[in-house]
């Protein structure tokens, strides 16, 4: 039950925070910088898969270690690292291979992934420790 609570809470925190970020920043940051690279709407199947896979990774690499150590700080730290590594893989690959991919987007998106990963792992771990104990 603890794993399910950790996953669900991490996923919920991740999706809500990312939807807020994207809703706020697409028009201000991403569309001006990326222009025609962005779709007008969202391609839902890959988006849904991403929003299921990412919290599963957070559970494995951050929430479970945080639960085992009973440490929110450890979970947040591992979640932040997971966010840095995953968003960094995406953004640095794009920066290395796509014509016109801005350094500013790479750096801002990596920072966002770091914060988001740490936040979602913290929420998932706190919920699991609180309600699964």
Image (cartoon, rainbow, N blue to C red):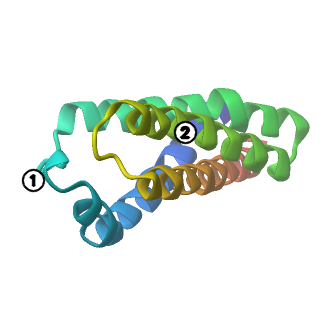
The relative height of residue 64 versus residue 37 in the rendered view (above or below) is above
Q: Residue at x 19, y 39 (%)?
A: 44
Characterize the local packing of mark 2: few (<14), some (14-19) or many (20 or more) Cα atoms within 10 angstroms: some
Is 55 left or right of 30, judged from the image as shown?
right
Give the residue number, with chain letter if any, for mark 2.
88
Label 2 residue SS: helix
* Residue 23 disc label: none
Of the two numbered discs 1 and 2 in the rendering, the one whose residue sits closer to the viewer = 2
Q: Quadrant of the N terminus?
A: top right
Q: Residue at x 70, y 52 (%)?
A: 122
Label 1 residue SS: loop
Give the residue number, with chain letter if any, for mark 1.
40
The quadrant in which residue 26 appears is: bottom left
Residue farthest to the front, as pictured: 99
* Residue 107 x %, y %: 53, 54
Q: Quadrant of the C terminus?
A: top right
Residue farthest to the right, as pictured: 69
Q: How many marks?
A: 2
Of the numbered discs 1 and 2, the one sitting upstream in the chain is: 1
Between 109 and 59, the one nearer to me in the picture: 109
Q: Residue at x 70, y 49 (%)?
A: 131
* Residue 82 x %, y %: 64, 37
Q: CA distance from mark 1 to mark 2?
A: 24 Å
Is 71 left or right of 97, judged from the image as shown?
right
Between 70 and 62, the one nearer to me in the picture: 62
Between 120 and 108, the one nearer to me in the picture: 108
The quadrant in which residue 128 appears is: top right
Is 42 left or right of 11, judged from the image as shown?
left
* Residue 70 x %, y %: 87, 43
Characterize the local packing of mark 1: few (<14), some (14-19) or many (20 or more) Cα atoms within 10 angstroms: few
* Residue 5 x %, y %: 60, 40
């Amino acid at each position: 039950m603890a794993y399910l609570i950790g996953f669900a809470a991490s996923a919920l925190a991740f999706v809500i925070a990312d939807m807020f970020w994207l809703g706020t920043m697409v028009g201000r940051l991403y569309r001006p910088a990326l222009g025609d690279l962005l779709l007008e709407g969202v391609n839902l199947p890959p988006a849904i898969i991403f929003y299921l896979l990412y919290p599963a990774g957070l559970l494995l690499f951050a929430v479970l270690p945080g639960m085992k150590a009973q440490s929110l700080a450890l979970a947040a730290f591992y979640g932040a690292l997971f966010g840095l590594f995953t968003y960094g893989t995406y953004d640095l690959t794009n920066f290395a291979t796509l014509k016109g991919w801005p350094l500013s987007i790479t750096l801002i998106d990596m920072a966002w992934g770091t914060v988001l990963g740490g936040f979602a792992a913290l929420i998932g771990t706190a919920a699991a420790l609180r309600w699964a104990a």
